[in-house]
Image (tube, grey):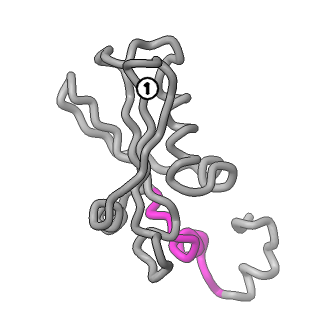
C-alpha cells in the first residue's frame, strides 16, 4: 500500500514508495551511537515515527522515551541525548536549518529540549540521517 493511504494517486504519479519518502524530506535513517562501548549502528526510521511525530523535536521525544528509562539518572552511562532534524532541513524554507536536542537535565531530572545550529542540521541530513 502506498504512503498516505490513497493508492490511486501514488499509482498515477509513477513514484515509488522510496521516492515519496524523499519528497517528504526524510533521509530515513537513525544513527545510534554508544559512547561507552564505542559502537555505532544504523537503524531505519520507522513509518510510525514519520507519520505521528512530525519533525525533529517530535521524533526526538518519541526516541528518548523509547530508548531510555524515565527514572534513569542524567549522568548514567545509559542516559540518552537525542539529536534530530525535521523534514524541511536542507530545503529553501526559511529557518529550516535547525537541529533539536532532547535530554534529561541534571538539575531537575526532567526532559528538556533545545534547538539551534545553522550548518550542523544540513550536514546531518546530507549525511543521510534524521536522528
Residue drawn at (37%, 34%) of the image = 81
Q: Is residue 89 left or right of residue 33?
A: right
Q: Nearer the viewer, residue 53 or 31?
A: 53
Total numbered labels placed on residues in the image: 1
Q: Nearer the viewer, residue 5 or 128?
A: 128
Q: x, y (%) of residue 72?
A: 44, 13
- Residue under pointer 1: 104
Q: Is residue 106 left or right of residue 66?
A: left
Q: Which residues are magenta?
A: 14-28
Q: Give the vertical position of 93 relative to 80 (above or below).
A: below
Q: x, y (%) of residue 85?
A: 44, 57
Q: x, y (%) of residue 25?
A: 51, 70
Q: Give the vertical position of 103 relative to 6 (above or below).
A: above
Name the secondary structure under disc 1. Answer: strand
Q: Nearer the viewer, residue 97 or 7?
A: 97
Q: x, y (%) of residue 78?
A: 35, 19
Residue drawn at (54%, 29%) of the image = 66
Q: In this view, which residue lies farthest toward the left?
A: 38
| Residue 8 lies in quadrant | bottom right
Q: Quadrant of the N terminus?
A: bottom right
Residue drawn at (63%, 49%) of the image = 53
Q: Give the vertical position of 117 relative to 32 (above or below).
A: below
Instruction: Tell me if residue 41 is in the magenta stretch.
Output: no
Q: Nearer the viewer, residue 53 or 5?
A: 53
Residue drawn at (38%, 28%) of the image = 80
Amino acid at each position: 500500500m502506498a504512503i498516505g493511504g490513497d493508492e490511486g494517486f501514488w499509482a498515477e504519479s509513477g513514484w515509488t514508495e522510496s521516492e515519496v519518502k524523499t519528497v517528504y524530506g526524510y533521509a530515513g535513517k537513525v544513527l545510534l551511537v554508544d559512547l561507552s562501548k564505542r559502537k555505532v549502528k544504523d537503524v531505519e526510521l520507522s513509518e510510525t515515527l514519520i507519520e505521528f511525530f512530525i519533525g525533529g523535536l517530535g521524533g526526538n521525544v518519541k526516541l528518548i522515551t523509547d530508548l531510555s528509562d524515565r527514572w534513569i539518572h542524567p549522568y548514567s552511562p545509559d542516559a540518552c541525548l537525542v539529536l534530530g532534524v525535521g523534514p524541511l532541513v536542507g530545503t529553501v524554507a526559511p529557518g529550516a536549518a535547525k537541529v533539536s536536542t532532547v535530554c534529561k537535565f541534571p538539575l531537575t531530572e526532567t526532559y528538556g529540549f533545545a534547538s539551534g545550529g545553522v550548518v550542523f542540521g544540513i550536514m546531518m541530513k546530507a549525511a543521510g540521517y534524521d536522528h
